[in-house]
Image: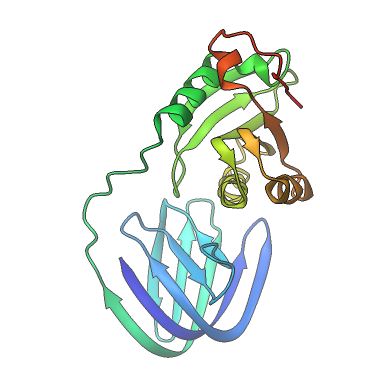
Amino acid sequence: MRLVIARCQVDYVGRLTAHLPMAQRLLLVKADGSVSVHSDDRAYKPLNWMSPPCWLTEGEGVWTVQNKAGEKLVITLDEILHDSRHELGAEPGLVKDGVEAHLQELLAEHVTTFGEGWSLVRREYPTAIGPVDLLCRDGAGATIAVEVKRRGEIDGVEQLTRYLELLNRDPLLAPVRGVFAAQQIKPQARTLAEDRGIRCVVVDYDALRGIESDEFRLF
């Protein structure tokens, strides 16, 4: 992984255009080829990025990152304050707890929990920043990304938002909507999800396992 702290300007040119004026930022170049631009806020979410497959060309004071579709991330460097490379080694991946992993498995087997006519495209659908728990089609054939949690909190909504941003760049999938599914969803997480157009679904683990429950709700 390469870490560069620089005063820079960033322009994204493609199906959408975006401009970041000159400021100090962190440029992250990963071994998978992705390049992302970060500020000192927004937690872990980048300001802009280019997902692999893409390639980086370094010129005099300018980086150009381009993908197969011809989209470009042009980074104009005014001053480089830090430039280092680090070998992180193999990533063992996120290990879900037993209940959460089983909940994902049960929902994959019973995707009609989310609505009539739903079908599963794939579990653990891969993206450049990690796998989407469930990629589905609804009864109308629209693509839906489902993030499954035992407890639904704000970080889970942020995670699903990042997946949706990536998936919606794929013309074969777009438009992709999101569903945030959990046994419990905190009010702040629900508010954030609904503000971003993400549907929230509360599921009952015992009911999915075939155990009768008077508390089963789906909304």
Q: Residue at x 60, y 25 (%)?
A: 136
Seen in the picture, residue 121 relative to 1 is either above or below; the reply is: above
**What residue is shown at x 65% (from left), y 31% (from top)?**
144
| Horizontal arrangement in the rendering, residue 210 relative to residue 28 (left or right) | right
Q: Quadrant of residue 113?
A: top right
Nearer to us in this view, 200 or 198: 200
Q: Does residue 5 sit above or below 28 in this rendering?
A: below
Q: Residue at x 44, y 44 (%)?
A: 130
Relative depth, front residue between 61 and 216? 216
Q: Residue at x 66, y 68 (%)?
A: 18
Counting the numbered discs, the total is 0
Q: Is residue 113 left or right of residue 82?
A: right
Residue extending farthest to the front is 214
Give how far across and how far down residue 92 sits, in percent: 27, 44
In this figure, which colouring scheme has been used for the structure?
A: rainbow
Residue 52: x and y in percent read: 43, 52
Q: Quadrant of the N terminus?
A: bottom left
Q: Position of residue 174 (x, y in %)?
A: 66, 38
Whole-percent x, y for residue 205 in the image = 56, 21
Q: Quadrant of the C terminus?
A: top right
- Judging depth in this view, the residue of 95 and 34 nearest the camera is 95
